[in-house]
Amino acid sequence: MSFCKSSLKRAAVSLALSGSVLFCTLTPGAAMAKGTKGLAAPDKPLAKNIILMISDGCGYNQLDAASLYQYGETGTQVYESFPFQFGMSTYSIAGEYDPAYIWSSFNNVKNAPTDSAAAATAMSTGVKTYDAAIGVDNDRNSLMHIAEKAEELGKATGVITTVEFSHATPAGFVAHNPSRNDYEGIANEMLKNSATDVIMGAGHPYFTDNNTPRVPSAGNFNYVGGQNTWEGLIAGDLGVADADGDGIADPWTVVQTRDEFVDLMTGSTPNRVVGVPQVATTLQQARSGDQYAAPYVVDLNQNVPTLAEMTRGALNVLDNDKDGFFLMVEGGAIDWAGHANQSGRVIEEEIDFNRSVEAVCEWVEQNSNWGETLLIVTGDHETGYLTGSGSGIVDVKPVWTDLVNNGAGNLPGMQWNSGDHTNSLIPLFAKGDAARIFKSYADQNDPVRGKYIDNTEVAKLLFEIIE
């Protein structure tokens, strides 16, 4: 990777964007330059590196369920000691979050939830949009992603996930598409037209959810851009964007096996990496066996990287750029387990995500510092309406009970109340000098969760502090 690509990359990306993307009249970055909310004092902290970690579908109780299983107590995750902690509202353009309404009846939180596409777009661009929208506003105009802003500044960028790389959340930080369901079109934009340096996620056309090969004639190429795109990617002759701004197309290096992902964690790296583990839809959650068993009763797929291994590999590629980087890391299958009310697998997936956060913290402390790096850990919405047992309408009144601590290594007492997303507040944790700007955004109050921000304010802060 080029060690100083800022001027070339900035010019190339700006030219490409002006010719191919219709932006809204005012991006979040431009709005702040005009003195809107959030404009900081002259000594405002800036961030060279930005890492945004999204536990898809995770609310307060999903986090606690994993902690109770791991440690037999809550409050023990590394990010739970971060200095800045708030709630976050997640509704899309058609909704709102009214604390008085939400807490007045047990089922009110089920009304007007967002989907992952609109939520990712809000966190990436600072603009509310409709469900299913990827990087476009309510009128289907393309918006500037924070990753595109990072590219303009000469930084490296990456997105990684435990589900298909063209799925809603990673797509919502790279692509522009009116429908999240256009996986083939989204994958082609990500691979051929974006300046992204690292893309990792499932969707392998020739493997099942059990990490077993399909016969070649049964390949499913939907999530990788179609058969021609996949074959061009493997052959190394896929038409791709000029990622470093030197006027020459930058080919992808493809990694697939767990050993290849592990090798990427140390030593020298390729310039650009696409990592497609040898599974169809998720690293682990969709594997066969008793899908409602306790955590780890069903053997994990073995020749598949963990999210922590993918994260370490991505960081080793991106930190070659002395201008810094933006990285989005998603634990995507936490949401899938929530939809299916799979208590054991939601805990497995959340633990996998938590270990990736630990890997990031280790990287910051060994290779950077909290003065130049901002880490945000949050979700995009809650899925499954997880509570303690016995929650519901009791004697005409709403009752929410706590999860029951059954000790480390045992499933906590827990109850699913939905198979869909909810409009709950979710937790947000942040560390790094630039994270203190969140205090100026946390100007709303919930009677249960306390101070909270809106998901659009994640992007607004990032556009404000990126340098």
Image: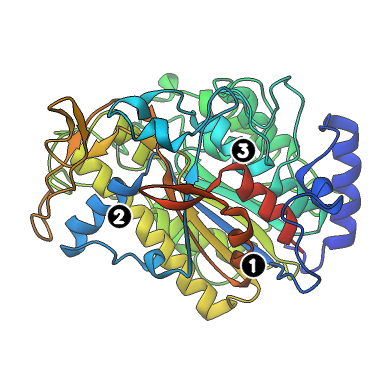
- Element marked by disc 2: helix
- Residue at which label 2 appears: 351
Query: Which part of the image, by quadrant, shows the C terminus?
Result: bottom right
Report how far apart the C-alphas of labels 2 and 1 lie in the structure: 27 Å
Name the residue type under label 1.
Ala
Looking at the picture, how far across and down is residue 458, in whole percent?
A: 61, 50
- Looking at the image, residue 107 sits to the left or right of residue 312; the answer is left
- Looking at the image, residue 301 sits to the left or right of residue 251; the answer is left
Q: Which callout, 2 or 3, points at the residue further toward the start of the chain?
A: 3
- Element marked by disc 3: helix
Q: Are there few (<14), some (14-19), or many (20+) residues within 10 Å of tag 1?
A: many
In this rendered view, identify the residue nearer to me: 193 or 387: 387
Name the residue type under label 3.
Ala
Residue sitting at 54 percent across and 73 percent down?
A: 364
Report how far apart the C-alphas of labels 2 and 3 lie in the structure: 26 Å
- Element marked by disc 1: helix
Looking at the picture, how far across and down is residue 15, in whole percent?
A: 91, 42
Judge whether residue 420 can be spotted in this image: no
